Amino acid sequence: MKLLYFPGCSLKTYATVYEKTALEVLRALGFEVYELERWNCCGAEFTSAIDFFMHHVGAVRDLIRAQEMQRKYGTNKLLTLCPLCYNVLALVNQKLKQDQEFYERVSSFMDDEEKYELGIKVIHLVSVLREIPPEKIKEKVTKPLSEFNVAVYYGCKLARPKEVAIIDPEDPLIIERVIEELNASSVDWSYKTECCGAYLIATNKDAAKNAVERIIYDAIDNGANIIATVCPLCHFNLTYVQEKLMKHRKIVPVVYITELLALAFGMESLIEPRKLKTIKAVVQRR
């Protein structure tokens, strides 16, 4: 299957290991992934406030970039790895389709762009994983992860708002099924889709610390020895708060689900040495 790919800002800065492992894992599973040849920040956060109309123009330009590449590669599926990017692109795409006034107003700003024809489908990595047959993942496993008790942390953006939600906020279970194919165990816990504090980490560290502590403690209390996420901001917050702000010494490693897939597929060279050492320490502590 062919996929177009919108990386977004974080995948080219502090989440490069997420991008690298995701792309290689997808290729190993038979996907052809083509990064947009030109792209810009999607706007980072969707807002319906009329005064922020211009914040959505960037996302429309990215959809047009995907439309251009659709003609080249023959696919209209635009993959995102960041849930915030997915949220913005999916909501703007939906609003363009449902709100004619919005569509015409946005189009009036595109003097140097071709007209967006509303044909792009925005998807997230979790949607892709949901459609992969379990046996296809299992056959790629060369190093079973039987030592891992994984708390799958989706974060809030894939469950909200309901118009573009990918997962059931009460009982997601998509990545948990993938975890089982890696011969790891997934823990049953209560904070899979709770907010980690998001951008409060920059403006109100105490609030972010409180949000993250609840997540970390619940994961530990339910037997997790590692947390797997699909969100760069969640990964940053959970890691930063544990290392800088929490006083207890029991740290739960936070990884991207694609790092666990890469490890199970025998691709540990894709993981940075310091992170790999942290992951392997889970095995030693058990």
Image (cartoon, helix red, strand yellow):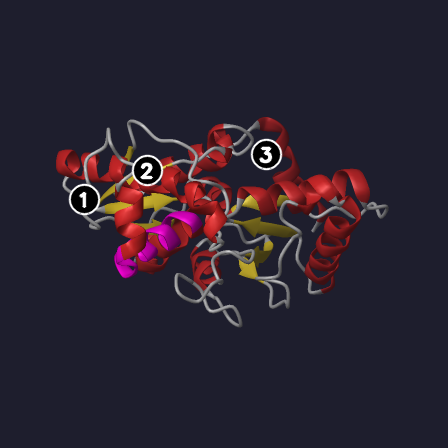
Q: What element carries label 1?
A: loop
- Horizontal side of 41 relative to 189 (left or right) equals left
Sequence-first tag of 3 and 1: 1
The amino acid at mark 2 is Asp
> Badge 3 local density, few (<14 within 10 Å), some, or many (20+)?
some
> Circle 1 sits on which residue?
75
Task: Measure how far apart labels 2 and 3 are at the Cα level.
Answer: 34 Å
Q: Nearer the viewer, mark 3 or mark 1?
A: 1
Q: Residue 90 carries which label?
A: none
Q: Is residue 197 above or below residue 236?
A: below
> Badge 2 local density, few (<14 within 10 Å), some, or many (20+)?
many
Q: Is residue 59 visible?
A: yes
Residue 223: where, in percent of width, then height?
69, 61
Sequence-first tag of 2 and 3: 2
Task: Measure how far apart labels 3 and 1 are at the Cα level.
Answer: 35 Å
Which residues, given as a range, are shown in magenta?
88-100
> Circle 2 sits on which residue?
62
Which of the two residues, 208 or 60, is positioned nearer the viewer here?
Answer: 60
Whether label 1 touches label 2, CB < 8 Å: no
> Circle 3 sits on which residue?
276
